[in-house]
Amino acid sequence: MTISLRDVTKENWQECARLQLAPEQEHFVSSNAYSLAESKFMPTFVPQAIYRRDEATADEAMVGFVMYGYYPDGEAPWGQRHWVFRLMIDRAHQGRGYGTAALRAVLARLAADPACPTVLIGYETDNPIARKLYHGLGFREIGTAPWGELVAERATEQRG
């Protein structure tokens, strides 16, 4: 299995917007359609479609969505920082390691930016799967954001 991150374009944005979480997960993350709209007004946000490639068959499929980048607004510790704003894997493709692989790819991209010594990620307090994933990749909780999410931080130069 190979994961790649690709731009969301006029050719694939509708497919990206149709990706779905399980009903009990929908409150964990904003919809992809909302995130794509948000990225048009926040030029430092990078929306990416997550594709997996089956090496045996050369089959490719969009399996998720991630959005990361620099949040220029607000004050420390939440503003003027790099974030992973969204990470979602379509319900039909969950549990196969795609989220972990995609997050590693994002962290590698952010590590290449000398202006990004650390990255933040937020998640709902009732999302133990996200917590386990993020902790497994070296994120450590630093507090609760004003909007209620737990926030974790990770140095970008870490290996994970």
Image (tube, rainbow, N blue to C red):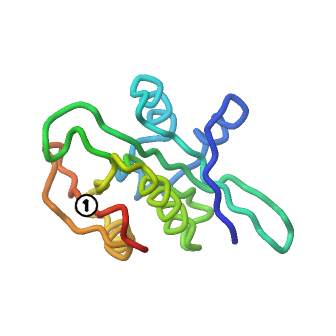
Q: Residue furthest top?
A: 41
Can you give x and y, in whole percent of width and height, for residue 77 in the image?
Answer: 14, 47
Q: Which residue is mark 1?
A: 153
Q: Residue 81: image x %, image y %?
A: 26, 44
For the point 43% across and 27% down, the residue is: 43
Q: Tell me: residue 40, above or below residue 139.
A: above
Residue at 28%, 32% in the rendered image: 72
Q: The C terminus lies in which quarter of the figure?
A: bottom left
Q: Is residue 121 visible?
A: no
Left or right of 28 on screen, residue 37: right
User: In the figure, 80 relative to 22: above or below?
Assistant: above
Instruction: Look at 30% across and 55% down and name the residue there.
Output: 117
Give above or below for 35 relative to 27: above
Q: Residues within 10 Å of mark 1 (few under 14, many from 20)?
A: many
In the image, is residue 147 above or below residue 88?
Answer: above
Question: In this orientation, does residue 102 appear?
Answer: yes
The image position of residue 54, as x and y in percent, is 77, 68
Q: Identify residue type, mark 1.
A: Glu
Q: Residue furthest right?
A: 57
The image quadrant that residue 96 belongs to is: bottom right
Find the residue positioned furthest to the front.
Answer: 114
Left or right? Give the position of 69 relative to 98.
left
Q: Residue at x 29, y 54 (%)?
A: 120
Q: Nearer the viewer, residue 113 or 143?
A: 113
For the image, the number of numbered tags is: 1
Query: Quadrant location of the N terminus?
Result: bottom right
- For numbered disc 1, what is the local secondary structure? strand
Q: Is residue 87 left or right of residue 143?
A: right
